[in-house]
């Protein structure tokens, strides 16, 4: 994801009323990129659909085309050379099974672009397509251009790719309790999990939603999932930064005037986690003990859990697999 985020650092956003107009660090830009992904996933979850995982290649393709559209001063799915989204994602190494693209121009914030897409039947159908599991977002702005701002959204699915998504793809959390969605759980006949370098759980019946307790020290934490599908084992992981509440509010970039509001939202989210604990979930035991299955398939309850959000590291890390099993990576490359 660093390549895609790096492209954002050269932009000066003149007169654009977006949350990150004054942002000047990679971390802040990355957080906001994930904030946009979380807003998409909240909409999908409210409709009973699985969340999407930010994908580095899709973000790179989306960002490049957002810049192209801004320079061209018009919005169209075919570029000047007659090439469509399939060409653009192929050039960054994303070999899709399904692919969709949403474009917008003139909106001064991500929220307005998202609202416009949801009001348009064709764009809404793309955004709420249950077949997609990965997401790319791009944005460009120039106050001297009549389009002012362009927004690009790529939605995709690859064969045999099953992303793992913590807290709707959030960048950070101030609570060690997190919710994890596992794409591919419906296709699997067994799964197991681990947190950081702790012990693996036993192989058990698959569950799409997991509830995990991270070790209670500040820093990056990883949830890794292995799925048995057919005669193969697929593995993916996602990472989230656990930080103190004070630091969380600062990194979120909302300013001192919003700190009290964010604190109330965090408390509300924590209460939501407890209310959602009636279904199956996973809890990491102390001292590296194996995970226990317990379940949460109620989408509304899960949505309740995730209103806090600063946002997640976009990359996935592979862990070492047992030598007796063939492990295929799934999720972000």
Image (tube, helix red, strand yellow):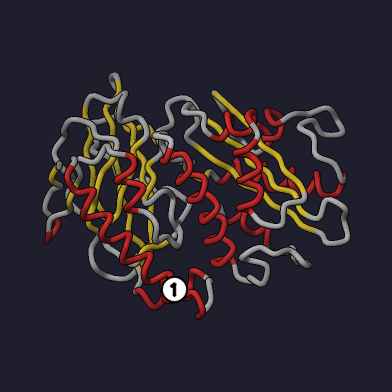
Count how many numbered circles sit on residues in the image: 1
Corner quadrant of residue 27: bottom right
- Front residue (pair 118, 8): 118
Extreme front residue here?
A: 119
Corner quadrant of residue 325: top left
Using residue 179 as the reference point, say whether residue 109 is left or right of it: right
Would you say residue 316 is visible in this rendering?
Answer: yes
Using residue 92 as the reference point, say whether residue 269 is left or right of it: left
- Residue hosting label 1: 249
Using residue 326 as the reference point, say whether residue 15 is left or right of it: right
- Measured from the top left, where is residue 98 in percent x and y? 56, 25
In the depicted structure, whether residue 194 falls above or below residue 77: below
In the depicted structure, whether residue 207 falls above or below residue 242: above
Extreme bottom residue here?
A: 256
Would you say residue 95 is visible in this rendering?
Answer: no
- Measured from the top left, where is residue 118 in percent x and y? 59, 39
Element carrying mark 1: helix
What residue sits 81% from the left and 59% below the top?
142
Corner quadrant of residue 120: top right
What residue sits 37% from the left and 51% below the top?
167
What residue sits 41% from the left and 62% below the top?
172
Extreme top residue here?
A: 230
Mark 1 neighbour class, 10 Å CA radius: few under 14, some 14 to 19, many 20 or more: many
- Measured from the top left, where is residue 290 in percent x and y? 13, 48
What residue sits 21% from the left and 55% below the top?
274
In the depicted structure, whether residue 82 falls above or below residue 264: above
């Amino acid at each position: 994801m660093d390549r895609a985020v790096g492209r954002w650092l050269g932009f000066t956003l003149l007169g654009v009323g977006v949350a990150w107009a004054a942002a000047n660090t990679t971390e802040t830009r990355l957080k906001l990129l994930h904030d946009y992904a979380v807003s998409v996933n909240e909409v999908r979850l409210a409709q009973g659909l699985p969340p999407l995982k930010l994908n580095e290649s899709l973000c790179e393709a989306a960002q490049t085309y957002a810049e192209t559209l801004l320079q061209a001063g018009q919005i169209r799915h075919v570029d000047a050379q007659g090439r469509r989204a399939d060409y653009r994602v192929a050039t960054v190494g994303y070999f899709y099974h399904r692919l969709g693209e949403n474009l917008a121009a003139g909106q001064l914030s991500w929220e307005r672009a998202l609202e416009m897409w949801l009001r348009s039947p064709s764009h809404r159908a793309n955004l709420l397509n249950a077949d997609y599991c990965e997401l790319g977002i791009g944005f460009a702005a120039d106050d001297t251009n009549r389009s002012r701002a362009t927004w690009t959204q790529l939605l995709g699915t690859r064969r045999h790719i099953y992303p793992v998504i913590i807290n709707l793809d959030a960048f950070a959390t101030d609570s060690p309790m997190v919710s994890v969605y596992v794409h591919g759980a419906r296709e699997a006949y067994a799964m197991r999990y681990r947190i950081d370098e702790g012990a693996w759980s036993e192989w058990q019946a698959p569950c799409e939603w997991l509830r995990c307790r991270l070790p209670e020290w500040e820093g990056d934490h990883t949830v890794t999932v292995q799925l048995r599908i057919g005669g193969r084992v697929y593995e993916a992981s996602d990472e989230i930064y656990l930080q103190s509440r004070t630091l969380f509010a600062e990194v979120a970039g909302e300013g001192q005037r919003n700190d009290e509001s964010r604190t109330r939202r965090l408390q509300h989210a924590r209460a939501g986690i407890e209310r959602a604990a009636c279904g199956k979930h996973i809890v990491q035991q102390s001292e590296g003990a194996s995970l226990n299955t317990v379940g949460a398939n109620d989408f509304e309850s899960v949505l309740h859990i995730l209103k806090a959000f600063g946002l997640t590291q976009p990359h996935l890390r592979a862990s070492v697999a047992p030598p007796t099993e063939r492990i295929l990576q799934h999720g972000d490359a």
